[in-house]
Image: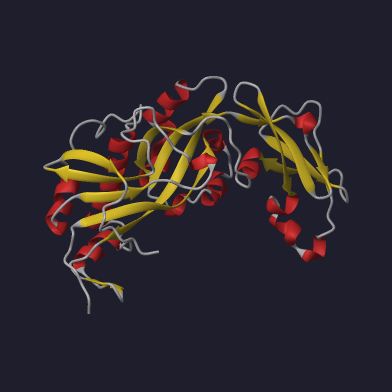
Amino acid sequence: MSSKNSSQWFCFEILKGAYVFHRHLFLDDIDAHLHYAGYPGSNIYYLVRAPKVRFVHDECIVDDQTLHCCISVGAGRKIETSIKLQNMFPFSQNPEIENYRFDVCVSPDQSDTTVLDFSPRSNPSARLPVDISAILGSLDLDLGARPEVLYVGQSTEILNRWQSHKQVNRALSMLSDSEELRLYFLHFQFFAELKQYDEVNGFDNDENFKCLLNSENRESEEFRDRISILEQTLIHFYRPTLNTQHVTSNLNTAPFNRTADKIGSLTIGMSIGMHGHAFDFWSPSQVLETEVATLSSDGGNVTFTPGLPDVCKCPH
């Protein structure tokens, strides 16, 4: 067996993520929106400022099972795009109704520009509302401005207090008329190098590996420490406008210290990028302009360098 000693590091990366608009939190079917956004499996949320997007109703039509629509972005910019209905309506892939045809039905007094009403030609009086998020979720549109991270927190906390969340209200007060607030729910996964790493068989069943990667017991101290370290590292990297703790101070906190005692060091690799313009996060005060970086901590004093540790091997 070929093995090597622990280099005393762990790393995290985004496994998946999605977002909801802040306005969705007032809907009766908010649970469905949050399920779609992956909230139940997430561990981190961002409050994000992004350009406001709205339908231009009188420039949206359906032709041959394709929606051709015009979207107003920010302060008046327009984007024209097209999308197959089957990418929006799962039931349109059902072969029994593959010949369904829809029209965009917009009444003159329709004021909600975040929704398009579709009417089946076989039943013109029926209405099937489609939120603009269904369009954005199926297309990778460049809105002309990167999503700005205003606040980082643990997603296990947000829904219990979002209506009275001071930072949510502060974020809303920062928006211009051409901007809106999004809540991103992100699921980070973790990897750690063990005391023994078999280059043929991979990671063995070491306690260090367990304490960092075992997510079965979400109430355990190890799990809470792992999420706290992730949250604090992201705050220290992005330095969001609305976070007040862990922004510029050292990270000599209890979760860091407890974890350092277990794995001997705090060298943390992080991969925080995702595909698509909607996930091209940034903050005007972030430490480095990169999506892959290494945090090194010496007694709580933190430095970031581009790239992952040379020894970092994350299984996929």
Q: In this view, does 17 lie to the left or right of 248?
A: right
- Residue at x 49%, y 51% (from the top left corner): 38
Nearest the viewer among 43 and 16 is: 16
| Residue 228 showing in the rendered view | no
Residue found at the far bottom of this picture:
1
Nearest the viewer among 75 and 99 is: 75
Displayed quadrant of residue 129? top right
Where residue 25 appears, x then y in whole percent? Answer: 52, 38
| Residue 168 showing in the rendered view | yes
Where residue 33 appears, x then y in whole percent? Answer: 56, 46
Circle count: 0
Q: Give the vertical position of 149 relative to 176 (above or below).
A: below
Nearest the viewer among 293 and 107 is: 293
Q: Give the vertical position of 127 relative to 180 (above or below).
A: below
Q: In this view, does 201 lie to the left or right of 32?
A: left
Position of the N terminus by quadrant: bottom left
Q: Give the vertical position of 225 relative to 51 (above or below).
A: below
Position of the C terminus by quadrant: bottom left
Where residue 294 appears, x then y in whole percent? Answer: 27, 46
- Residue at x 65%, y 30% (from the top left corner): 54
Where residue 118 appears, x then y in whole percent? Answer: 78, 43
- How did the renderer colour the structure? secondary structure
Displayed quadrant of residue 161? top left
Q: Is residue 260 left or right of residue 140?
A: left
Q: Give the vertical position of 89 relative to 233 (above or below).
A: below
- Residue at x 18%, y 50% (from the top left corner): 266
